[in-house]
Amino acid sequence: MKDLAIGVFDSGVGGLTVASEIMKQMPYEKIYYYADTARVPYGEKTPDEIKGFVNEIIAFLLGEGVKAVIMACNTSSALALTETRKKFDIPVIGVIEPAVLMALSQTREKRIGVIANLATTNSGAYKNKFLENGNGVSVFQQACPMLVPLVERGIVDGEDVKIVLKSYLEPLKAQKIDTLILGCTHYPYLMKPIEEIMGDGVKIVNPAYQAVKDMKSMLEEKNLLSGRGEPPEHKYFVSGERQSFMKTAEKLLGRKL
Ligand code: DGL
């Protein structure tokens, strides 16, 4: 079991922000990454469609040989985590709870913004998690449907990106949030312009760090951490066109796949 891979999946390149964090925190773990680029963006899909995609992807990853799965996708974590945990007999970690706990540990004024896609904001998953965990926190959500298509094309900086980002972020600034959750795994690739727009007073939360930390503790607890062998060889599976995924992924990761 220890030598099996960690499964990581997303609608596209966004989950690579989580895969990179695994490489940092657990450099001996092998990653099987699934990018559902044939069906990106998930933000425009219905809850039932997303649940169906998640079932198919986890069944596929299990067939390839994984010991645990990180849903490196807020949309899937929002809509399918509970059912998936009941259905499959391996540990599955989502990104929403780690994001909420990180934000709660950072906020001073208890004014927290969440940017995400439409399916995630409509699901109410973030608001519900805050209700479960946070006392008297005000949560301001903003759906940002134009961001995923930009990141999928590798466009993560420049004036056009800033104009789009400003239109989404200004309403949150006006609410005087002091913490902003990047509630879509594609968004950490926009960290630089987001930080520039939000300014120094706002803490930006990338859920990947805590989600991977939780995965590491869970693997340790179950005695499933991989031993220090050869450097692991990761595998990437793509449901859509392979070249464009590789091109964007290599640009964002800064190395060859
Ligand atoms: N990166 C995914 C998320 O975190 C999905 C984005 C999308 O396809 O809309 O929600």
Image (cartoon, rainbow, N blue to C red):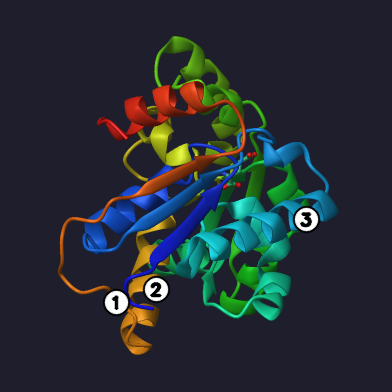
Pointer 2 with pointer 3, Cβ within 8 A: no
Name which residue lies at 60% across and 72% down: 136
Mark 1 C-beta to ligand 1 under 8 Å: no
Which mark is nearer the camera, 1 or 2? 1
Task: Report, in whole angstroms, how far the alpha carbon at label 2 lies from the one at label 3.
Answer: 26 Å
Earlier-in-chain disc, 1 versus 3: 3
- Amino acid type indicated by mark 3: Gly
Crowd rating for badge 3 (residues with CA inside 10 Å; few <14, some 14–19, many 20+): few
Residue 214 shows which numbered tag? 2
Q: At which x and y percent is residue 63?
A: 56, 63
Name which residue lies at 83% across and 47% down: 46
Name which residue lies at 31% across and 40% down: 200
Quadrant, the N terminus: bottom left
Crowd rating for badge 1 (residues with CA inside 10 Å; few <14, some 14–19, many 20+): many
Secondary structure category for the residue under label 2: helix
| Viewer-nearest residue: 231 or 186 | 231
Say which residue label 3 marks. 52
Secondary structure category for the residue under label 1: loop
Residue 225 shows which numbered tag? 1
Name which residue lies at 60% across and 80% down: 89
Would residue 150 be found to the left or right of residue 226 on screen?
Answer: right
Which mark is nearer the camera, 2 or 3? 3
